[in-house]
Image (tube, coloured by chain):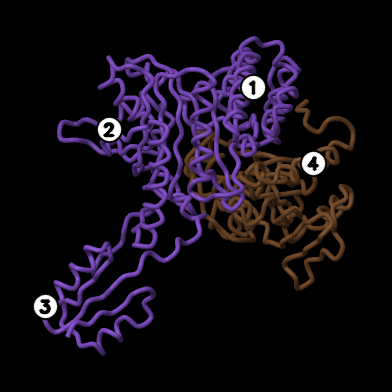
Chain colours: A brown, B purple
Amino acid sequence: MQAEYLTIALSKGTLLKPTIKMFNNVKLPAGGLDEDSRSMVFTYDEPRIKYIMCRPTDVPIYVEQGAADLGIVGKDVILEQARDVFEMVDLKYGYCRFVVAVPAALENIGIKELNYKRVATKFPMVAETYFRSQGLQVEVIKLHGNIELAPLMGLADVIVDIVSTGRTLKENNLVELVKIMDSTTRLICNRVSYRTKYEQIQPLIETMQNYTTGGNGDGNKAV
Amino acid sequence: MINRKIPRGLRDLLPAEVAVQRDIEKKAARLFKGYGYEEVITPTFEFLEVVETGAGRNIREELFLFTDREGGILSLRPEMTVAIARLAATHLQDAVFPQRFYYIANVFRHVQPHLAQYREFWQLGIELLGAAGACADAEVISIAVKVLERIGLENFKISLNQIGIFNSLLDESGMSIEQRDLIRSLVENKDLVELARVLDTLAIDDLLKETIAILPILHGGLEVLKRMPYVGKNRNAAEAVGELIKVYDALKVCGVTEHIVVDMGVLRGLDYYTGIVFEGYSPELGYGLLGGGRYDKLLGSFGLPRPATGFALGMDRLAMLLKKPEAGPARYMVGGKDWTQMINKADELRSQGKIVEMDVAGNSREELEEKLHGRENCQLIFVE
């Protein structure tokens, strides 16, 4: 009997290039994978794998519902979506960090002084959880893009956003006040697929672990 | 405005859906009875204190709570095992054990509703009370396998673990309760990345770290049990491993091991499990189908210290996987001009075990033919 297809949901956009590079390294098929192509599904027979092209924010739901067995997506998205999926491998690329940023004029403000302030963000879940863990209550304003604009126009006092180099912040006269956490790309897995397609999935996880740890040693080791 | 909303997460079941559910119930009940299990019914709601005594405090945020007129806090039942433990402690203090019970019940949880997860859902299951040992676990697990087979599922897997392995490893680590809860949820959710990070910050034996880190991905036959380096150093964990092997061997005799997978990542959410735990999955559904295990302390917490084991199966999820049942037996529609003749004809057919509807509106033959148009499997009998 032929094995069933293993379906992997891929994040379109900046993560795609390093993902293809990683696939080449771990000997997964990647020929013809291209987000400019009109196809949204790429099927290979050796090994039997299907890739589906998704918006990054949609990857966790595809995996949670079992429409894809595996997914490749940033930790930032995973945290915000809080979906019920297994997080199996830290693929290390696509680094960014969640930060609290304020207008340069407030550079020296203490975090405790942000109580009851307005926070603009694309990540209400992450923002809410962070401020609550600090014992602070804030008003979270969900925006869909150009978060930096909000404090400039007086819509919010501070922002929570992801940054990689920090250049955008600087250009908009904002400064990083606190780093909430780091984020990198992760391999996520459906709860049931892991068990029902174990023979296909587990070796893949191990190769990816070895790849991210530089190809030496036991990928299962925690230390 | 007419209000015909129903509360979030609830649903109506129409005849075709009820038929599937009743079919599941019938097949399961017949199987359970064949093993000597008898049906019990418990109240739909219980005191919150009872639910929490059994299931622990962590379950509270999933409960539907309300108060009675005396100010007592009541909870719709979130599952059946606690209720049956309470029932046993109430009524069976002097009974001869083991006792075997099964149930078919609706249960209620205030969860985020999604595909295959409703706030009122139907469970059926069995509890084997007052029986310790591998054979008791094997009986319950093999019934779980057989019930899925009997209902017509193929390709499913039962993941098996002994929760004592994990608990003993953590007992020895000297971690705080909070740390243990965190590690437990990371192992259960197979968050390998965060698990590695947290373990890295703990000051515990390296071999122990390595063993805990590998638990979520230990999955396969009995050979995976050899991949836990620290277990040899921990007597309780080694004993738990021994027990798991015994149950596996007993399952071999029952002839069901083709469906069994050893999986060290199965820890079950509920607090009352003490030994063997298991979960059932089908490749066609992204969510678990059944779950169960051994709960040797639960009856004791109600004042009847007895070991016990059992499982519950989610009927709503199972129903999603089943093929539509074949059309039922032929039906008849009796129409006519004379009511007495119609009654006599209908009764005659019913006495032969037929399903007979009557036209109660005095329609003509043509009108009735029109109404039956497109309805499969229904024959018109028009008495003149």
* Image quarter (top left, top right, bottom left or bottom right) of the C terminus of chain B: bottom left
Kindly identify which residue carries mark 1: B245
- CB of mark 1 within 8 Å of CB of mark 3? no
Marks 4 and 2: same chain? Answer: no
Q: For residue A203, which numbered disc appears in the image?
A: 4
Occupied quadrant, residue B3? bottom left
Apparent side of residue A136 relative to residue B375 in the rendered image (left or right): right
Marks 3 and 4: same chain? Answer: no
Q: What residue is drawn where x is 49% and y is 44%? A: A138
Using the numbered discs, state the Cα–Cα distance from disc 3 to disc 4 in whole angstroms.
Answer: 73 Å
Using the numbered discs, state the Cα–Cα distance from disc 1 to disc 4 in whole angstroms.
Answer: 25 Å
Q: Is residue B303 visible?
A: yes
For the residues carrying marks 1 and 3, which lies nearer the camera in this image? 3
Kindly identify which residue carries mark 2: B46
For the residues carrying marks 2 and 1, which lies nearer the camera in this image? 1
Occupied quadrant, residue B44? top left
Which comes before the other along the chain, label 1 or label 3? 1
Q: Position of residue B57 (x, y in %)?
A: 40, 27
Q: For residue B4, which numbered disc appears in the image?
A: none
When the figure is inspected, residue B144 is found, relative to residue B152, above or below; the finding is above
Q: For residue B339, which numbered disc appears in the image?
A: 3
Q: Answer few, some or many: residues within 10 Å of disc 4's Cα (few below 14, many 20 plus, some between 14 and 19).
A: few
Chain of the residue on which disc 3 is drawn: B
